[in-house]
Amino acid sequence: MVPKSKRFLIAFEGIDGSGKTTQIILLKEELDRLLYQTLITKAKKPSQETAFKKFLKTFEIASDSLSYMFLYQALHRKQFEKTVAALENGNIVLADRWSGSFFVYHLNFGPLSKGPREHVALLNTLAFENLKPDMTFLLDVPPQIAFERRVRRGETDTFDADTVCFYEAVHEKCRAFAEENGWIVIDGTLPIETIHRQIWDMVSEKLGQ
């Protein structure tokens, strides 16, 4: 059977441990079953984490520096380029974070948050060329639950007071940004299959399934 062609970009946002990867995989399986051409894009994959940390150490780049920010912008740009190429080939692209995460972070945290907001907008234009997703889902999960999930997966074992405050702040800013920009907010504490069905119902309606 001939694969279906559909130029469509769906972004998933949420703090680490909110369930983005799980829901993206489930959605891709559903789309694959219906013969849609699909691609998952992400700025940095888990398999690249070791190389990324080695690069930071080799070049003595601190995570709170402008150098780190520019490095991440290079990764965002690469994600954008892969996404555009896939869209031009008639793929549905599932983005594990998009420019929304960029705005939430840089407008509120890090070195850019202390400067003119115009700088953030300009960098977003350079990295993402203002390409907006057709749909954006925010998986809303309290930071403590998200952290417990990450501990079970072996991704982290520390969650000090500063980390708690940071994730709580990011969580709050994500929710506010979602409301301002019309994101679809999903309760990420629901059972995995329930979340998937909610997402699929809305995606399938958009695709005319």
Image (cartoon, rainbow, N blue to C red):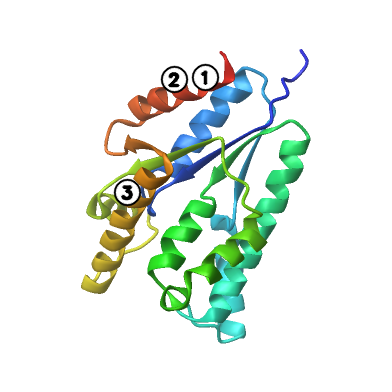
Is label 1 in contact with label 2 (beta carbons under 8 Å)?
A: yes
Point out residue 5 in the picture as x, y percentages from the top left corner.
Answer: 73, 24
How packed mark 3 is, by other alpha carbons closer than 10 Å (few <14, some 14-19, many 20 or more), is: some
First along the sequence among labels 2 and 3: 3
Q: Residue furthest bottom?
A: 60
Label disc, if present, on residue 175 of the rendered structure: 3
Reading the image, the residue beneath label 1 is 204
Residue at left 45%, top 23%? 202
Callout 1 secondary element? helix
Point out residue 193 in the picture as x, y percentages from the top left corner.
Answer: 37, 26
Disc 2 residue type?
Asp
Give the alpha-carbon distance from disc 2 to disc 3, as whole Å.
22 Å
Disc 3 residue type?
Arg
Label disc, if present, on residue 185 of the rendered structure: none
First along the sequence among labels 3 and 1: 3
Give the alpha-carbon distance from disc 1 to disc 2, as whole Å.
5 Å
Q: Quadrant of residue 169?
A: bottom left
Residue at left 27%, top 54%? 143
How packed mark 1 is, by other alpha carbons closer than 10 Å (few <14, some 14-19, many 20 or more), is: few
The image shows residue 110, relative to residue 80, as above or below, that is below
Reading the image, the residue beneath label 2 is 201
- Position of the N terminus, as image quadrant, is top right
